[in-house]
């Protein structure tokens, strides 16, 4: 017994049974938040990151969606869709300019008796930065401006999203 204990003590002091920093698994929670027109908001009611094939061009895209409930029948979503650089097998970072032609939007959802209604607001300007922190994890930052319009197409408002950030989002691969 003493001999076994002595061998274990020697092995552990030599580092034979030690763990490296890369062996430690942390379970940090996912988060997604932004400052919307000056008010901090968490978009944590629903967060999804899916890497899937586009039916349009056959390439893989990373679809990031986060939702914040406002009431029992309405919510806001932020949605981004970018080419999936995380499949390259190396960690890295990409930066995207957000504008009217970018695939993504700020969405206002409302459940009505006739069915759900969505007001999609295209980004007017902004930036999205995504960093792959592990094989299936991403974090990032974003900011953008979107406009609202009335039924006649007249601009009714300009809304600013600043200090946008998401951390430890797990990628689901299809």
Image (spheres, rainbow, N blue to C red):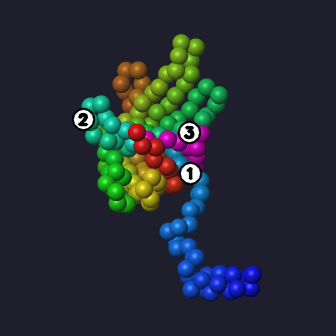
Residue sitting nearer the eye, 8 or 4: 4
Label 3 close to label 2 by CB (< 8 Å): no
- In the figure, 19 relative to 79: above or below? below
Could you tell me how far apart the alpha carbons at marks 1 and 2 are, in whole angstroms?
Answer: 30 Å
Asked if the magenta segment contains residue 114, the reply would be: no
Q: Secondary structure at mark 2?
A: loop
- In the figure, 165 relative to 6: above or below? above
Q: Residue 113: horizontal and vertical position, in percent?
A: 58, 14
Q: Secondary structure at mark 3?
A: strand
The main secondary structure of the magenta stretch is strand
Q: Residue 123: horizontal and vertical position, in percent?
A: 37, 40
Q: Residue 31: horizontal and vertical position, in percent?
A: 56, 51
Q: Which quadrant is the N terminus positioned in?
A: bottom right
> Which residue is label 1 attached to?
30
Q: Count up the numbered dots.
A: 3
Q: Earlier in the sequence, mark 3 or mark 1?
A: 1
Q: Earlier in the sequence, mark 1 or mark 2?
A: 1
| Part of the protein shown in magenta | 40-50
> Which residue is label 3 attached to?
46
Q: Quadrant of residue 93?
A: bottom left
- Dot 2, crowdedness within 10 Å: few (<14), some or many (≥20)? few
- Residue 165 appears in the rendering: no
Could you tell me how far apart the alpha carbons at marks 3 and 1 are, in whole angstroms?
Answer: 11 Å
Q: Nearer the viewer, mark 3 or mark 2?
A: 2
Q: Secondary structure at mark 1?
A: loop
Name which residue lies at 55% across and 25% down: 110
Asked if the magenta segment contains residue 46, the reply would be: yes
Could you tell me how far apart the alpha carbons at marks 3 and 2 are, in whole angstroms?
Answer: 28 Å
Q: Quadrant of residue 122?
A: top left
Q: Earlier in the sequence, mark 3 or mark 2?
A: 3
| Disc sitting over residue 57 in the figure | 2
């Amino acid at each position: 017994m003493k001999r076994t204990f002595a061998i274990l003590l020697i092995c552990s002091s030599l580092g034979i049974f030690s763990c490296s920093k890369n062996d430690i698994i942390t379970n940090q929670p996912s988060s997604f938040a932004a400052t919307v027109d000056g008010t901090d908001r968490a978009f944590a009611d629903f967060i999804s990151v899916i890497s899937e094939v586009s039916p349009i061009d056959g390439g893989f895209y990373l679809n990031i969606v986060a939702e914040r409930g406002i009431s029992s029948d309405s919510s806001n979503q932020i949605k981004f869709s970018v080419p999936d650089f995380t499949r390259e097998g190396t960690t890295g970072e990409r930066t995207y300019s957000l504008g009217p032609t970018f695939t993504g939007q700020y969405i206002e959802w409302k459940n009505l008796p006739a069915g759900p209604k969505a007001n999609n607001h295209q980004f007017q300007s902004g930036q999205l930065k995504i960093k792959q922190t592990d094989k299936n994890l991403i974090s990032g930052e974003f900011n953008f401006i979107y406009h609202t319009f009335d039924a006649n197409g007249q601009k009714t408002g300009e809304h600013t999203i600043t200090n946008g950030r998401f951390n430890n989002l797990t990628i689901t691969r299809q």
